[in-house]
Amino acid sequence: MKGYLHLADGKTFQGHLHGSLTEEGITGEIVFFTGMTGYQEVLTDPSYKNQIIVFTYPLIGNYGINEHDFESKKPHVAAVIVFEAAKTAYHYEAQHSFTEYLEKWDIPMLEHIDTRELVKSIRQNGTMPAKLSSECVCESTCDSMNGLKVQEVSSKAPETIGSGDTHIVLIDYGFKKSIADHLVKQNCLVTIVPYNYTFEQIAALKPDGVLLSNGPGDPKELFGQLQEIRKVIEHFPVLGICLGHQLAALALGGDTKKMLFGHRGANQPVYDMKSNRVFMSSQNHSYAVDPNSIVSTGLKIRFFNKNDQSIEGLYHEQWSLMTVQFHPEASPGPEDSVFIFGEFINTVKYRKRREVSYA
C-alpha cells in the first residue's frame, strides 16, 4: 500500500506503508536519528514522545527486538520512516522482528523512501510538523507541536528500586530505564517520583541527592516547576540530564532556545574543559541552553559540542549542581561519558559525610 509523508515546508515523499492509518493520518514533529544500531532503545525512549522518527542508516532491524534493551514499557514514537526494514531478526536473543514489534503496537512505518533527501530537507529547514497519510495530497500538516508531553510519560506515583546506603530521588520527566539502572549499579536506593512533585514532597523523602531526568518537548512548558527545581538545587546535590540540564539552567535564570534540527545520534563529540579531552556521546534533544543567558547566574560551562560549540554541560559556583546535555548512560551509543554517574555519587557522598561531621 502506498503511503505519503507530507512536511510543513510543502515537500511530499512517497513510500510503502506498513500498518493502518486513520482518515486524519498521523501527525508529529519529524526528526532524524543517525545511529547504525540502537533502534529498540530509540523506539522506547520517552523523549521521542509523539515524534516521527527517520532512521538514516539504510537498513534497520536486522538484529530484531530483544527482552533486555527497552528504555520504557512501550514505544513512544508516532511513526517510523526507513529506507529498508529487515523483515527477519538475525540474532539469537531476538523475540520479535522490527516490523512485528511496530505492528504489535500499531505504529505505522513508511519504507522505501529517499531518506537522504528527507534528512537534507530537515537539516536545511529544521525539524517541523509532518503528517503520514494514505492520501497523496495534503492540504495542511499540524500547525503546532506544542503540548505538555512530559505529563503523558511521567510516573503517576512514586516507585522505589535498588538498595544501598545512598538515596537518590529521580524526578521523572520521561526517564530512560538505563539511567535508573546506572544509579542502582552505583549502590543507590532510587526513588522515582512524578514530574510535578514539590520541593516539600521531595525533601520529605530525605534524599542524599536528586536527579533531574531526560524527557520530551520544550523545557519552557514546565515553567510552573522551575521554582520547585531551584529549591531542590539549593538544598541537595543535583545531576541534570538532557531535559533536566535545560530545566536546571532555566530555574537559575538562564534561557533555552530551539536548535535548527537538534542532536540525535550516538556520535556527538563533546569537549570536557576539566579533563581537556574529547569523547563521543549519545544525544537526543531539540533545545539548547543559550550561553549568553547564564552570564550572571553562577552557572559555568564545563562541556561543549565540538561540532557547533553548543553547551553540553554546566556546573554551579555555589551549589552542588552538575548538568549534561548528552546521555551518560548511552543506550544506545558509546559509554565514554558514564563517568558522570561516578562523579555525581562521589559528590553526594562527600556532601553526606560533611553533614554528618557537622551534626
Image: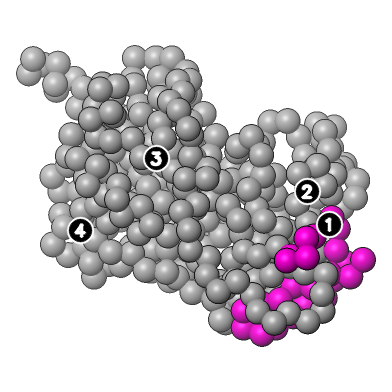
The disc labelled 2 sits on which kind of residue?
A: Asp
The disc labelled 3 sits on which kind of residue?
A: Tyr
Say which of 50 and 25 sits in front.
25
What is the spatial separation of the Cα atoms under label 3 and label 1, in whole angstroms?
33 Å
The answer to if 140 sits in the magenta stretch is no
Of circles 4 and 3, which is in front? 3
Q: Secondary structure at mark 2?
A: loop
The disc labelled 1 sits on which kind of residue?
A: Ser
Q: Earlier in the sequence, mark 4 or mark 1?
A: 1
Say which of 297 and 223 sits in front.
223
Q: Which residue position holds label 2? A: 106
What is the spatial separation of the Cα atoms under label 4 and label 3, in whole angstroms?
20 Å
Q: Which residue position holds label 4? A: 253
Q: Earlier in the sequence, mark 2 or mark 3?
A: 2
Quick one: label 4, few (<14), some, or many (20+) residues within 10 Å? some
Quick check: marks 4 and 1 in contact, CB under 8 Å?
no
Quick one: label 3, few (<14), some, or many (20+) residues within 10 Å? many
Q: Secondary structure at mark 4?
A: loop
Tell me which residue sits at (7%, 18%) in the image. 358
Tell me which residue sits at (48%, 58%) in the image. 147
Magenta segment boundaries in residue numbering: 1-25
The disc labelled 4 sits on which kind of residue?
A: Gly
What is the spatial separation of the Cα atoms under label 2 and label 3, in whole angstroms?
28 Å
Residue 33 position, x and y percent, is 63, 60
Tell me which residue sits at (62%, 64%) in the image. 28
Quick check: marks 1 and 2 in contact, CB under 8 Å?
yes
Residue 129 position, x and y percent, is 59, 71
Q: Which residue position holds label 1? A: 20
Which residue reaches farthest bottom? 10
